[in-house]
Image (tube, rainbow, N blue to C red):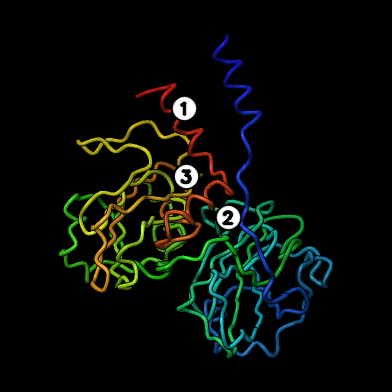
Amino acid sequence: MRTLVILTTLLLLAPPLRAQQERQLIDLRGTWKFEIGDRKEYASPSFNDAKWSDIFVPADWENEGFAGYDGYAWYRRSVTLPSKLPADPLYLHLGNVDDACMVYVNGTLIGEGGRMPPQYETAYSVDQRFPLPVHLLKPGERNVIAVRVYDDQLNGGIVRGRIGIFEHQWGIRPLVALPGLWKFKKGDNEQWKDPALDDRGWESMLVPAPWDIQGYRDYDGFGWYRVSFDAPASLSNEELVLMLGRIDDIDEAYLNGERIGRTGRIRADGSVARIREEYRQFRGYPIPSGLLKPGQKNVIAVRVFDNFKIGGIYDGPVGIVRRKDHRIWNERYEDGSSFQRFMDRLFPE
């Protein structure tokens, strides 16, 4: 009984996760192009939508002249981005989409909400936001957003909420920023930590973003990420931390073949210890002195195990920062790591 009281008190006193600050870069509320029906060419940036209807977003399409319609429809909007993009990551916010959606930027799928038939699943109450891969964007030029929507019943469309492109400010600026395209391979082999490994045959994977929206929907199991980078010579005498954002569910991180940290536990035989809420934790792993090679090529490898729903390096700041800056940032964001360590000690494997 005493343990229950202690746990209840801790849970009540534990501070919530603080969200990153968001600054709106472009307001996308207003008139979009709209067409009922479903054709794959609607996603193409070169498609001519001049004959489509105009529709206000956000709003139920039933209130915009399409009363009683259930089924597929497409929204399109062209937007010119600033010639110089912010250093912080950009996200597309689409509010609530009733019932399911697939989102394309310049013809490439960047995310999904809910499920399309035949495995239909509504996400009408979920706030939809999607990372915008920098390599897909055209600064200073026309960019095309296309949204495929399926409505099963009642109201449909991009119905409410914040609509726009937002800069997500995590409050820390890496010395080496590592978001972008990494190498990825499904499965598990500890040799994949080797910095000399030839990973040219691996797939490209956007980091941070769930692997479920990048060809691995419903995949639960192991996957490895790898990225090579050049470290500035100025980092020679710095105390550093590798930040890997949030990972669903557990992970081991390697730098130049040496493990520098883990969250959760993967046993020597490849089995996995009990998973709790590691997916909520921001990863920050101290880099041992002498392991980073300033002025040379370095390789990060991350072994990930996903147990349920989305998986991968899905959110948060990714890069190398000063240890003192990470300490200040970590105190401010209070990601629950200390509480998790307490739980691990209280309920050992």
Residue 332: give its label: none
Q: Quadrant of residue 224?
A: bottom left
In the image, what residue occupies the spot 60% across and 45% down? 17
In the image, what residue occupies the spot 60% across and 69% down? 148
Query: In the depicted view, which residue is nearer to us: 168 or 116?
Result: 168
The Cα–Cα distance between marks 2 and 1, rounded to whole angstroms, is: 33 Å
Under circle 1, the secondary element is helix
Under circle 3, the secondary element is helix
The Cα–Cα distance between marks 3 and 1, rounded to whole angstroms, is: 15 Å
Q: Residues within 10 Å of mark 1 (few under 14, many from 20)?
A: few
Q: Position of residue 10 (x, y in %)?
A: 60, 26
Residue tagged 3:
279
Residue tagged 1:
343
Q: Single out the residue that lies furthest toward the top.
A: 1
Q: Is residue 146 left or right of residue 134?
A: right
Q: Position of residue 341 (x, y in %)?
A: 44, 32
Under circle 2, the secondary element is loop
The Cα–Cα distance between marks 3 and 2, rounded to whole angstroms, is: 20 Å
Task: Tell me the amino acid under the disc marked 2.
Answer: Gly
Which numbered disc flags the more N-terminal residue, 3 or 2? 2
In the image, what residue occupies the spot 76% across and 61% down? 160
Q: Is residue 303 depicted above or below 86 in this figure?
A: above
| CB within 8 Å, label 3 to label 2 | no
Task: Tell me the amino acid under the disc marked 1.
Answer: Met
Number of the front mark, 2 or 1:
1
Q: Single out the residue that lies furthest toward the front.
A: 237
Q: Quadrant of residue 84?
A: bottom right
Residue tagged 2:
114
